[in-house]
Image (cartoon, grey):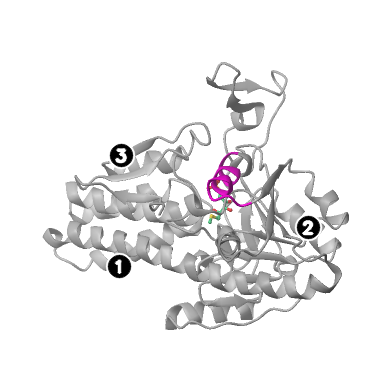
Amino acid sequence: MMSRTLRIDEDGVLRTIDQTLLPFERREIALRSVEDCRRAIVSMQVRGAPLIGAVGAWGLALALRDDPSDAALHEAWRWLLGARPTAVNLRWALDRAMRRVAPLPPAQRAQAARGEAMAICDDDADCNRRIGEHGAALLEALRERLAPNRRAGAPLNLLTHCNAGRIATLDHGTALAPIYLLHQRDVPVHVWVDETRPRNQGASLTAWELAERGVPHTVIVDNAGGLLMRQGRVDAAIVGCDRVAANGDVANKIGTYLKALAARDCGLPFWVACPVSTIDPQAVDGDAVPIEERDAREVTHATGRLADGTIAAVQVVPDGSPVANPGFDVTPARLVGGLVTEHGVFEASAEGVARALAAGLAGTARTAGIAR
Ligand SMILES: CSC[C@@H](O)[C@@H](O)C(=O)COP(=O)(O)O
């Protein structure tokens, strides 16, 4: 049994894998302070919307351990929130922890914040398990629809972008959760893994995760998906996301929009998997989502392992060429076939988002099948 992405060791220290070293090295790091937590988020040692949120909540708890005053609480909340801008799960988790601890006397805050951080982690693992179930039902239904025109035993071919897997969350992943479940149930499945330049979360992290679990997959360059879809070698695309706006627009890793366009042109389903905590009712539409602009060096250099085993960054852009590096893009709601959440599958629309939020508030499980 594989452990969760964040764990507390026998000495009570929070530990996680340094994702900047994967797939070449599996090294654990300790997060002992609010500074460690923020640094891990900024440097992308931890990344993926739900995991960023959980580490943010832990950061707040560690800040309160050192100073539980009102001033320290608000300063830590503000400082952690600025670590990365696009994934709303960071704000969601910090707000949840803040609501829990702010009304308490300072002496009780650190323990309460630690309890809330643990609860956020437990809830995330549980949400993703349920996303896996709802998503697997969707994929099974697709497989049945395709069956008459397929040879027996042919795999369902799914395309994914970036890494919305186990290590982007506490456990199971979002977009990969249904895939893991199908694989566990011996349903033949094959994943086309977009490399996801510039940081290659697909090639480095998704491929690593899928290999670890024995899920058949093939890494492709980001520009290959359209061709494969036209050739009938993709049955559906499923991705995670960093923020869903109130109208159902979806912000996810840069390049997601192009896959959604290609999927629509080819008549293929394009699904987005996320917990309800990824919905931001304050963002009226995708244009209201802050898009992270990242370091030019991610574009000018590609990082990998050299023949002698050392990990190095090599320059791939001429000296002096200007570079732009937006980290995320927005896929309009009209291109999204459904939002696969822990409460079922909802239409990507203002109505669907409102229903998902209501289901989240009510805490009730419901399933709304989306047929394509
Ligand atoms: C379950 S994670 C969903 C998203 O956070 C994921 O698709 C993504 O875009 C991650 O971006 P990253 O920049 O690696 O944090």
Q: On screen, 340 above or below 239?
A: below
Residue furthest front as drawn: 152
- Picture coordinates of residue 108, whole percent (x, y): 14, 62
Provide the residue span drawn in magenta. Answer: 204-215
**Mark closer to the chain start, 1 or 2:** 1
The mark lying in front, picked from 1 and 3, is 3
Q: Name the residue under label 3.
A: 30
Q: Are marks 1 and 3 in contact (CB under 8 Å)?
A: no
Examine the image and state in which quarter residue 199 appears.
Answer: top right
**Mark closer to the chain start, 3 or 2:** 3
Residue 52 located left or right of residue 235: left
Dominant SS in magenta: helix
| Residue positioned 31% across, 52% down in the render | 58
Q: What element carries label 1?
A: helix
Q: Is mark 3 on a helix, strand or loop?
A: strand
In which quadrant of the rendered image does the N terminus lie? Answer: bottom left
Kind of residue at badge 3:
Ala
Mark 2 lies within 8 Å of ligand 1 (Cβ measured): no
Q: Between marks 3 and 2, how big is the CA–CA gap?
A: 40 Å
Q: On screen, 321 above or below 166?
A: above
Q: Name the residue under label 2.
A: 234
- Picture coordinates of residue 186, whole percent (x, y): 61, 63
Mark 3 lies within 8 Å of ligand 1 (Cβ measured): no
**Mark closer to the chain start, 1 or 3:** 3
Confirm whether the magenta stretch covers residue 338.
no
Q: Are marks 1 and 2 in contact (CB under 8 Å)?
A: no
Badge 3 crowding class, 10 Å Cα cut-off, few under 14, some 14 to 19, many 20 or more, is some
